[in-house]
Amino acid sequence: AAVLLPFVAAADMTVEMEGMLQKGDLPQTGKDWVTLDNGVEFLPGSDADTRVANVRKLWSGNQVGASSPYDSIFADGSETYYDEYAQAWRVLGWYIDCDFCNGDNGDGNDFCQGDRNRRLENGDGDEDAAPTGCPRFLLWAAYVDVDYEGNGGNEYSHFNRNTGRWNRRNCKSGARCVKMDCHMPDTNFKLIGFFKEPRYDEWMEQLINYQGDCMWNDSEYKLMHNISPMGLVNTCTKTTSRDEYSGRYLYYNLQPNEHATVTIGLYTEDTCTEVYKGSTAASTVLTKLISKYQDDNANGDDGNGDGSADEEVQIHSYALDLVESINSWNSAFAAFRTCQPCKAYDLTKSVAFTPRGDKTQCQR
């Protein structure tokens, strides 16, 4: 039977630590990160047969050759080595990467945020020559049950976060039934690898549509569906408010926190790494910023004269919606810290695989 690899437990400890998960805290497997066609980065597990070529194909942005539009949801796929029902995944948390290279500066050379930051610190270089801010990434892990016997979702019991107990309702009498427990230190699931998501707003939208509706209750689903994933910003944005101590303008961006939670944080510089320590709330800063652009519209001044003020109002409103519901949002999202099936099926009803009639079909 497969055993939990030591670095997975170490990864858990860094995720659970107080404060932000930094790039230096990322797990190591002895292998190199692979950049997939859609910009997602993948780190294979140290002893897992990950069929990297197939992973690369299935995660392709254009999905050439994919058998269905859902293939890209899986860490591996139905046409590759591991059966889709045997695969599982879980969220580890967000982290900040100030040395990220995106290869997109327009001159054929990689643009690296850390290089720009160091040039600015030395007074060298044009501040407007490259994007500002240290990117945020979402880190998650994929696993496989190598002892899977072919019974589909009926081979697993699932952890109920509301009762703290394991639900065996999917299990067939007399057949193998094991816990889907890749989040536990004594799991028999084997690590496939780690994934770094740069466009986690798009990732979150897919998650809500194809898995969230299969496991959240109605109030949680409504909340997560109504709050736009675009509120999960990944840009260090200058506001109209100032730090009451230094007088510097405040910026806002996604702020990773412990236990795989997030909020919209306020910062005192344009990389969004120095956390604002004052008393002004993020909701107050965002409301003021939105009012500024609304006033621009009312006065016939939309900034660039191209309707950009309307767009700014919408963008900042998404972030404000997230701030105002952040506790409930984090509570619902916490479900994905525990082991989840890669093949989404209904975990909320008393009868196995019963799709919720008012939502997307759950058996994917």
Image (spheres, grey):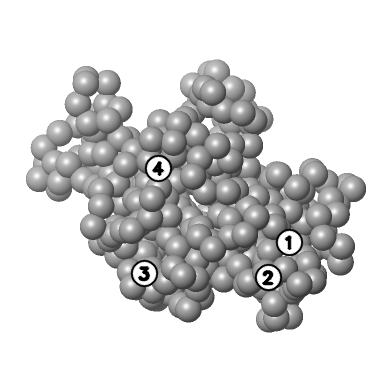
Q: Which residue is mark 2?
A: 177
Secondary structure under badge 4?
Answer: loop
Mark drawn on residue 154: 1
**Alpha-carbon distance for marks 4 and 1?**
26 Å
- Locate residue 363, reporting x and y percent: 75, 47
**Alpha-carbon distance for marks 2 and 1?**
7 Å
- Which mark sits nearer the N-terminus, 2 or 4? 4
Q: Residues within 10 Å of mark 2 (few under 14, many from 20)?
A: some
Do tag 2 and tag 1 residues touch (Cβ < 8 Å)?
yes
**Residue at x-position 23% and y-position 57%:** 30
Do tag 1 and tag 3 residues touch (Cβ < 8 Å)?
no
- Which mark sits nearer the N-terminus, 1 or 3? 3
**Alpha-carbon distance for marks 2 and 3?**
23 Å
Q: Which residue is mark 3?
A: 5
**Residue at x-position 35% and y-position 51%:** 44
Judge whether residue 261 can be spotted in this image: no
